[in-house]
Amino acid sequence: MSRIRIVPTLVITFTALIVLFGGWIMYRNYGLVRPLERELSSMAPVQHVNVVVNNQTKEIQVTLKKVPDLMTAYQSVKERVTSTLGNNVKIVIRDHRSKELIDLYQNYQPLIFEGIAKGNYTSMIDTLKRRAANDGITNARITMDKNNIYIQLEKGSDYLYEIVPYHEPKQIQINDGQGGDQQ
C-alpha cells in the first residue's frame, strides 16, 4: 500500500487554490472591471466612473456631466453595465449638486411621493415644473419609464439628478378584525 504524504499534498492543494483565486481576481479586474470602466468613460454623458466589485455586491458609481435627458443617459449606462456584469448591480448616479438644489429637491419630495401614491403623474410634473420655475430653477425636467421617475434640476453650473423608483400600489390585506400582528 502506498502512503500519501500529507505535506506535499497540502502544499500542492494550497498552491492550486492560490493560482485559481489569483486567476479569478485578475480576470475580474482586467477582464471585466477595467474594460467596463473604459467603455463607460468613453460615453458622452459620463464624466467619471468607479467600479466596486466585492464578493456579493457590485456597485457602479457614475458621475454624469450635464445631460439633456437623464433617462436616456441612465438607460444607456444601465444597458452597458448589465450586459457586462448582469442584473444584480447597483448603479449610483453622481451629479454636481449645490445645497440650494438639495434643499429645493427636499421641498419637492412630498409632491413627488404624493403623485406616485395617487398616480397623478401629469399633475405632479406640471406642479413641480411650476414650483421649480418660481424657485429660480433654470431647467426642471421630469421624465418617466416603466420603473423610475427621472428628475433633473439645474441652476447655473449646478445640477441635481435623482432617479426615484415607483411601484404599483400593493394590495392591502385585511385581518378580518383580528387586530395587529398574528403569529
Image (cartoon, grey):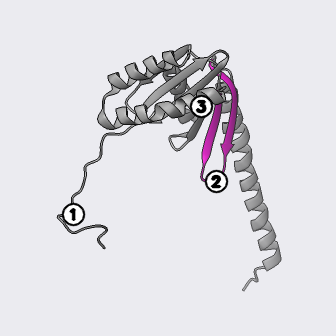
Badge 3 element: helix
Q: Earlier in the sequence, mark 3 or mark 2?
A: 2
The residue segment tinted magenta is: 45-63
Residue drawn at 59 percent across, 26 percent down: 160
The residue indicated by pointer 3 is 102
Mark 3 vs mark 1: give the one in front: 3
172 to the left or right of 64: left
Q: Position of residue 79 (x, y in %)?
A: 52, 29
Is 168 situated left or right of 37 in this image?
Answer: left
149 and 85: which one is in front?
Answer: 149
Q: CA distance from mark 3 to mark 2?
A: 33 Å
Q: Check residue 50 for magenta coloring.
A: yes
Tag 2 residue = 55
Marks 1 and 2, how far apart in space?
41 Å
Task: Tell me which amino acid carries mark 2.
Answer: Asn
Q: Which mark is first along the chain, 1 or 3? A: 3
Identify which amino acid the numbered label 3 is placed on: Ile
- Disc 1: which residue: 175
The structure residue drawn at horizontal position 31% and vertical position 68%, both measured from the top left corner, is: 181
